[in-house]
Amino acid sequence: MKQKISIFLILIMLFSIFILGCGKEFVPADDTGVTPSGMAGLAEANNQFAFDMYAKLNDGKSMFFSPYSLSAALAMVYEGANGETAEEIRNVLYFPEDKTALRSSFAGIYNHLNKEDKKYKLNTANALWAQKDYTFLPTYVQTLNS
């Protein structure tokens, strides 16, 4: 089971790297309601998740993964989860219980990282690719598009 989870997370990481290469022009996310403490809390959650992942994947060899990309991709999955599944995702990623605060904090971090007036250029992107004949709830799609 742990090996399946590790393979799944590695696939998400590779997918995130692929998506980064398919960049579009930066479109700011809706960060209405973002707070500095919310963004700091999400950054702390990301750090804890990164330490946990490193401890699980570390085999003594050099490795690289992006905890931000993983948690951003899994946050999209989390939006569609409920019950025990949602609770498990939230616990593993150290997300706050308030989904609205989580959304605005992710949007705030995304907007901050992708600002055009920085001395560096960093483009981040995440996307969900779904089976063509699978119908998602409109509210789920709307949430991910905002």
Image (tube, helix red, strand yellow):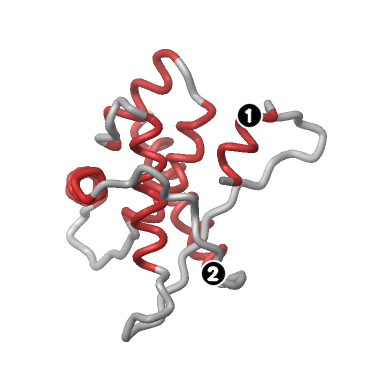
Q: How many marks?
A: 2
Using the rendered view, name the quadrant where residue 7 is placed. Answer: top left
Badge 2 marks a residue whose secondary structure is loop
Image side of residue 22 versus residue 98, left or right: right
The residue furthest front is 32
Q: Which residue is mark 2?
A: 26
Query: Sequence-wise, which precedes: disc 1 or disc 2?
Result: 2
Separation of marks 1 and 2 at Cα, in angstroms: 24 Å
Q: Name the residue: 54% across, 69% down.
A: 26
Q: Name the residue: 17% across, 60% down.
A: 60
Judge by depth and name the residue closer to the eye, 102 or 117: 117
**10 Å crowding of disc 2: few (<14), some (14-19), many (20+):** some
Residue type at mark 1 is: Thr
Instruction: Tell me, yes or no, whether the two marked residues, 1 and 2, touch with CB atoms within 8 Å.
Output: no
The residue furthest bottom is 119
**10 Å crowding of disc 1: few (<14), some (14-19), many (20+):** few
Judge by depth and name the residue closer to the eye, 130 or 117: 117
Question: Horizontal and vertical percent for residue 76?
Answer: 50, 40
Q: Name the residue: 34% across, 36% down.
A: 101
Compared with residue 105, is residue 66 higher up or lower down, i.e. above or below?
Answer: below
Compared with residue 118, is residue 1 higher up or lower down, i.e. above or below?
Answer: above
Residue type at mark 2 is: Phe
Q: Which residue is mark 1?
A: 139
Judge by depth and name the residue closer to the eye, 7 or 90: 90
Badge 1 marks a residue whose secondary structure is helix
Question: Horizontal and vertical percent for residue 123?
Answer: 46, 71
